[in-house]
Image (cartoon, rainbow, N blue to C red):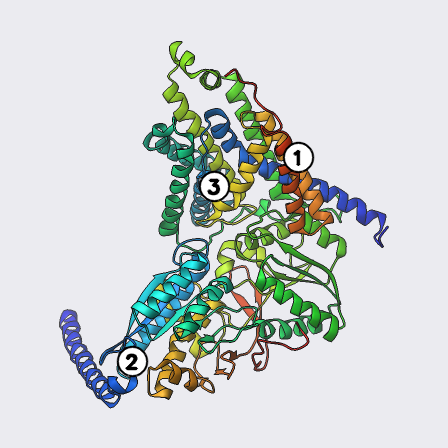
Amino acid sequence: MFGYSIADISNIVVMQGFSGLSMFTVLLLMALGLAIIFGQMGVINMAHGEFMAIGAYTTVMISKVAVTYGFVSYYFVFAILIAFILAFAAGYFVEFIMIRHLYKRPLDTLLATWGLSLVMQQIFRSTFGAKEVSAELPEWMLGSFNPTPDIDIPINGVFVMVLAMVVTAGVYLFMFRSRWGLRVRATVQNRVMAGAVGINTQKVDRVTFALGCGIAGIAGAAFTTIASTGPTTGTLYIVDSFMVVVFGGAASLMGTIASAFGIAQAQSILQFFMSSSMGKVSTLLVIVGILMLKPEGLFASKLRK
Amino acid sequence: MSTLNRRSFMKVSGALVGALLTAGIISNHALAADFPTSKVNTTGLAVTDTTVKVGILHSATGTMAISETGSIQAEKLAIDQINAMGGILGRKIEVIQEDGASDWPTFAEKSKKLLVKDKVAAVMGCWTSASRKAALPVFEKENGLLFYPTFYEGLEQSKNVFYTGQEATQQILAGLDWIQKEKNAKSFYLIGSDYIWPRTSMKIARKHIENKLGGKVVGEEYIALGDTQFGSVINKIKLKKPDVIYAAVVGGSNVAWFKQLNAAGLNSSKQTMLTISVTEDEVLGIGGENLAGFYSAMKYFQSIDTPENKKFVAEFKKKWGPSSVIGDVTQAAYLGPWLYKAAVERAGSFDVDKVQAALPGYVFKDAPEGSVTVEANHHLTTKLRIGKWKKDGQADVVYTSGYIKPDPFPKGYQ
């Protein structure tokens, strides 16, 4: 077939399948934090990418410390944890300073958070320099895993995949199996009523926003293994993140997962058979088409207005 | 005892420095007096008896700050050194720095400001082709002088611009010849970011591979700027098994490309790659371990082992910190102020028309990259080098070509 052997083609099918799954988990991790903030609170957080950058820079800094003190092989665990904590704290602070004054004006949050993203980019630039930096990766995360000599499964892809599953499970447990999640969902459904039964809705908002930012931090930490870390790194992710969330239907976790899966598979397969840019363009066209027919996204939440 | 020694040393050296300074000032005054302002500045530029204003126009903010910071640093270093030697025709260079902010219309606007309001005698600036194309009409209309540092796609020549980087054929042809001979390469996979420079470069590369080298291009691929997912592209490459990947991916995509290539098992032990878009600056972001063993084709590498380059590297690190690195474009930016100084001195005037006419033919012998010659088409004759990357982010220069004349409008390649 086209001058390739059957073995060649089956190897490529396996690796292509993995690359689709890998892209799915990357998109999912990117979009999860945004889905919580946008979906649960209706806040359009244009600075989402910059919270990822917080995570990425945290990882780079910790990797430097790790190289100095010789714990390179397992620093990533700390890096992810600290990335989450720092991004969570930054989100908590931003909500308190800025976002909470803008809940009644959803479009203004768009402008304000965009401004915030510019401010944060310049802070990164002034603090860490304009040039891109890279985290020293532990030896075990480099290279690929070979089930057969001709199949390469990237280890960093597997790592991102596992992390995405853990985080998604964590978010699910938090939203649907914990008291906090109950309060968040109650506040989303009916803010006044939730307040009346004694839920501190302001605090719920703050924690929800901070949680979304914290997850962005985790994503940023994970992406140091596959992409770049620089002051404007966040801008590489923001468009894809919004695409996943909007396509999935704003207020639904399942929607985000389904949409990340669909977009990743479509893009991955189209990019294999077409050129890379054309693959991306075609994916976008399909998304635009579907959104025209179903403006509320794949999984619309059924809210009583 | 030791304090006494130190004190007397300070006294002596202080006196010495003082004497040198006075001598410098006197000779400067003498030099400036030899070239009265009314004679050397007949067009109303910002040139006084003691100073000359020169603009620096790069992006200090925005996406391109990553790349352009090095150029700003190199230009400032060169200007400091020129001033320490007494300036140009006895006049110290006064820098007016403007920020292009990674926004192309801003480059045009700031060019206009520098030329019309500040009346600068020359501008060191622009980085991307887009910013140069935006500023070019302003420089041509106001008859300004621009020194442009980046290697670029060619197909341009303006009397108002001197191009201190390489145009496409200088960077591409000799590199392809080398890798074909060295690796006995027959099949090539071309991959680049999706904009003018990679596309023009790949067009030239394809023509050269097919018509001159008798090789085969098995794939040609362009990646949207900022795309970070290379899984499918890498699988395509694995299916085609090219002898050489020829790459011109830039920006954040570049980092993702190398990281994912390595993670997918295509490291330098299995795959030969020659890239024209990785300098020491990019290695910081990509990480040396992801690049080790791959090749770059550039005219300059920080590791070039000549006294001129060692001096340049030492002084650059002294001014900008020991961890700073110097890439190809940074070195080319360093040439700008020196070429301008030479041109003014050859012309005996700051007038733009005279400076333009005086520079072609000049040979800058002590450039860090080695001797360069300014040609009549305003580009430089330079050598091409192939560097093999090491884990520590430096490159071993494994091949140096002879001098290559610039050919911005290559026949048979368009």
Frontmost residue, B333 versus A74: B333
Residue type marked 3: Gly
Among numbered discs 3 and 1, the one appearing first in the sequence? 3
Q: Which mark is residue B85?
A: 2
Q: Residues within 10 Å of mark 2 (few under 14, many from 20)?
A: few
Residue B253 in the image: state x and y as whole percent: 56, 52
Kind of element beneath mark 1: helix
Q: Residues within 10 Å of mark 3 (few under 14, many from 20)?
A: many
B317 versus A253 height, above or below? below
Chain of the residue that carries numbered disc 2 in the rendered image: B
Chain of the residue that carries numbered disc 3 in the rendered image: A
A295 versus A11 height, above or below? above
Kind of element beneath mark 3: helix
Q: What residue does disc 1 label?
A: A262
The residue lying furthest to the top in this view is A197
The C terminus of chain B lies in quadrant: bottom right
Residue type marked 1: Gly
